[in-house]
């Protein structure tokens, strides 16, 4: 909270009311050897004005660069009404929904969120939000182990095209529970999961196959084929999806002959700003037959004794979340504020608006790729269809190029060499609906200059004259 109103007299009065002399006395059951004895490396407290100045300085140091980085966090336009409403006290300070008689507003908001996520993903049911997309995938993996009655294994097929950070988070969460993640390679030509590599596991016992859509490279996977393959081999299919893309693409509930069993993902594109990496929220939905194994809260709509509609937690008791190893999850809270923002965001945009955002993002990324690949030394790596991200190969050191772009206040993409050594000369670049033609021109012009292929003043590809090679462009462009 921004302001703590308790004076020293207030604190003494409260301590006297409960019969103790000091705040330290409230913690006397903690052995002395376990207590922290001061924080010598922490500076003394600052006044409000000094703190405000410090935060302003740090925010200014970040600047406002032109951002073409995606890689799991995306810059979308957020209508002003979203956070104007979410930061009202009714949402901002609301806490527990366990007491239904006092929490109807919170419960209805969560119910609306669940309904929208279920509709967007074409799943039968969705839960209240989870911490983020990576931990949501980990929860989906744990859920699949519990829910797949046809499998006795604790093995999961994890494509290498899943976000590397997500794979690391999932491994951290599940490895001490005896669960193994088997990495499935990708096709070097298309950027999609390699079906030949997948076929090597035919006949083996796995609980589930993760199906990203789009994958980390921005490439669209053959989700129908992958889902049907999983089901044919007695595996559950876990759809890891971008919610904005689902407004334009076939949702996971309609993949293959019978749809994915579980869908999850990162909700940040739905009304959450980039905000230096968080807080974000995860979402999850599933088929009705698996709902008892779904972690987190579920809000249902009902009627009271007078026939009036109301909302309450359903299917899972509060105690379920504190049963340690016997619980479906140790997550006993959700990112309620971010879920509220997503609910308002989706309500404001509606299905048509969300589809328009997805279509504009896709169009801008295609335009960006076309203009950049018109420069000698830049080429698209994968032939697969993409959604608002694309992998480009440069003929120069990627890190040097990105540093040079950063000097021009442009964040030019995400280098792939650390996660994928075979793509050390490649970067992942993204454009959403927020990018204008002028933004794309600015990146293109700076990229051409930095790569040093232009022989004379560079002209943006959309203004190419009769002699394109004069400007360092490919002759067939």
Image: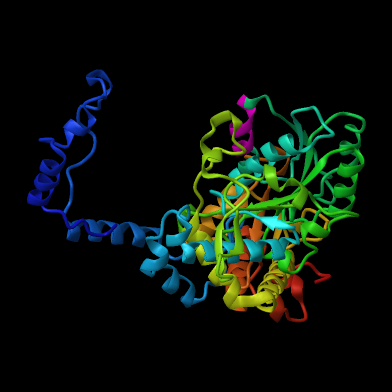
Please check the rendered image and state whether residue 16 is part of the magenta-colored stretch, yes or no: no
Q: Nearer the viewer, residue 89 or 312?
A: 312
Q: Position of residue 445 (x, y in %)?
A: 61, 69
Which residue corresponds to the image point at 69% horizontal and 75% vertical from the top-left?
A: 351
Which residue corresponds to the image point at 25% horizontal and 20% vertical from the top-left?
A: 31
Q: Position of residue 182 (x, y in %)?
A: 76, 32
Task: Please give left or right for residue 54 compared with residue 344 in the image.
Answer: left
In terms of secondary structure, what is the magenta stretch mainly?
helix
Q: Is residue 375 visible?
A: no
Residue 164 placement: quadrant: top right
Task: Please give left or right for residue 155 compared with residue 62 in the image.
Answer: right
Image quadrant where one finds the C terminus: bottom right
Q: Nearer the viewer, residue 412 or 444?
A: 412
Outermost residue, front direction?
305
Count of numbered tags:
0
Q: Position of residue 288 (x, y in %)?
A: 75, 52
Q: Magenta segment, which residues?
A: 168-176
Image vertical order of residue 362 relative to residue 40, above or below:
below
Q: Is residue 265 visible?
A: yes
Q: Position of residue 370 (x, y in %)?
A: 74, 68
Which residue corresponds to the image point at 67% horizontal and 24% vertical from the top-left?
A: 178
Which residue corresponds to the image point at 84% horizontal and 51% vertical from the top-left?
A: 190
């Amino acid at each position: 909270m921004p302001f703590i109103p308790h004076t020293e007299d207030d604190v003494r009065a409260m301590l006297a009311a409960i019969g103790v002399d000091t705040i330290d006395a409230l913690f006397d059951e903690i052995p002395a050897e376990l207590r922290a004895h001061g924080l010598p490396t922490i500076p003394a407290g600052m006044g409000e004005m000094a703190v405000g100045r410090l935060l302003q300085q740090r925010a200014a140091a970040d600047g406002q660069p032109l951002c073409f980085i995606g890689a799991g966090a995306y810059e979308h336009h957020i209508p002003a009404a979203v956070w104007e409403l979410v930061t009202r006290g009714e949402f901002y300070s609301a806490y527990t929904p366990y007491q239904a008689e006092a929490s109807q507003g919170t419960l209805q908001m969560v119910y609306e969120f669940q309904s929208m996520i279920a509709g967007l993903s074409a799943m039968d049911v969705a839960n209240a939000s989870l911490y983020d997309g990576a931990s949501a995938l980990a929860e989906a993996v744990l859920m699949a182990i519990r829910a797949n009655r046809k499998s006795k294994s604790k093995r999961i097929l994890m494509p290498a095209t899943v976000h590397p950070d997500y794979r690391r988070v999932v491994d951290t969460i599940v490895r001490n529970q005896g669960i193994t993640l088997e990495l499935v390679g990708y096709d070097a030509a298309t950027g999609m999961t390699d079906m030949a590599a997948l076929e090597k596991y035919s006949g083996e016992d796995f609980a589930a196959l993760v199906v990203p859509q789009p994958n980390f490279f921005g490439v669209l996977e053959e989700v129908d084929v992958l889902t049907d393959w999983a089901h044919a081999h007695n595996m559950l299919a876990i759809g890891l999806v971008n919610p904005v893309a689902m407004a334009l693409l076939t949702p996971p509930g309609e993949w293959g002959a019978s749809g994915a069993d579980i869908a999850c993902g990162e909700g940040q594109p739905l009304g959450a700003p980039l905000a230096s990496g968080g807080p974000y929220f995860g979402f999850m939905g599933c088929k009705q037959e698996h709902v008892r194994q779904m972690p987190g809260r579920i809000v249902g709509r009902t009627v009271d004794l007078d026939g009036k509609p109301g909302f309450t937690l359903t299917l899972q008791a509060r105690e379920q979340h504190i049963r340690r190893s016997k619980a479906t999850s140790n997550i006993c809270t959700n990112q309620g504020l971010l879920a509220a923002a997503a609910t308002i965001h989706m309500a404001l945009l509606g299905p048509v608006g969300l589809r328009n955002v997805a279509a504009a993002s896709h169009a801008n990324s295609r335009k960006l790729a076309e203009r950049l690949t018109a420069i000698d030394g830049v080429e698209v790596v994968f032939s697969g269809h993409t959604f608002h991200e694309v992998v480009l190969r440069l003929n120069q050191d990627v890190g040097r190029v990105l540093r040079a772009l950063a000097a021009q206040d442009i964040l030019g993409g995400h280098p792939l060499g650390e996660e994928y050594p075979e793509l050390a000369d490649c970067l992942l670049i993204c454009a959403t609906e927020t990018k204008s033609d002028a933004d794309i021109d600015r990146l293109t012009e700076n990229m051409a200059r930095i790569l040093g292929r232009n022989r004379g003043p560079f002209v943006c590809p959309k203004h190419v004259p009769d002699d394109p090679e004069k400007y360092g462009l490919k002759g067939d462009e």
